[in-house]
Amino acid sequence: MSGYEVAFHAKAAAEVQGLPERPYKALYDVLVNLPRDPWGHTYPDRLVDDPAYRFALFDDGDGVAHVRIDEASCRVVVHGVTWIG
């Protein structure tokens, strides 16, 4: 069992609304795997000077889930979702 859980910030939850089925499923698949190894399944966000802010690609790179790994609470917080489709 994983020590992490995935939580959505309200902004990210709103951004997921209306995603078509294919990218929605792709995002789901990525988020299901994050708790197992959040550092290994994400990339550093070089625009933020904090290594906890990272991103994960989904839907063959057409989507990005912006996350923050909170070690203290063992949470991966999704704070933004972008899809270019």
Image (cartoon, rainbow, N blue to C red):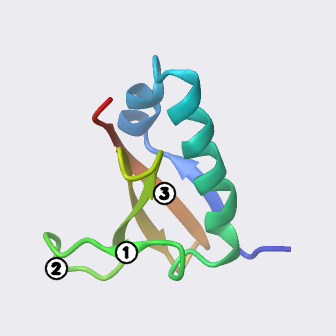
Mark 1–mark 3 CB contact (< 8 Å): no
Q: Is residue 35 above or below residue 32?
A: below
**Which residue is depicted at the point 61% across and 66% down?**
34
Disc 2 target residue = 49
- Quarter of the image that includes the C terminus: top left
- The nearer-to-camera label among 1 and 3 is 1
Q: Is residue 39 above or below residue 62?
A: below
Q: Quadrant of residue 45?
A: bottom left
Q: Is residue 34 above or below residue 27?
A: below
Within-10-Å neighbours for mark 2: few <14, some 14–19, many 20+: few
Q: Is residue 4 visible?
A: no
- The nearer-to-camera label among 1 and 2 is 1
Q: Whole-Å distance between the Cαs marked 3 and 2?
A: 17 Å
Q: Whole-Å distance between the Cαs marked 1 and 2?
A: 13 Å
Secondary structure at badge 3 equals strand
Q: Earlier in the sequence, mark 3 or mark 2?
A: 2
Q: Quadrant of residue 32?
A: bottom right
The foreground one among 8 and 18 is: 18
The foreground one among 68 and 85 is: 85
The foreground one among 5 and 45 is: 45
User: Which residue is the extreme one toward the right?
Assistant: 1
- Residue 77 — which label? 3
Give left or right: position of 18 versus 79: right
Residue type at mark 3 is: Val
Residue type at mark 1 is: Tyr
Horizontal and vertical percent position of residue 78: 45, 52
Give left or right: position of 57 versus 84: right
Secondary structure at badge 2 equals loop
Disc 1 target residue = 43
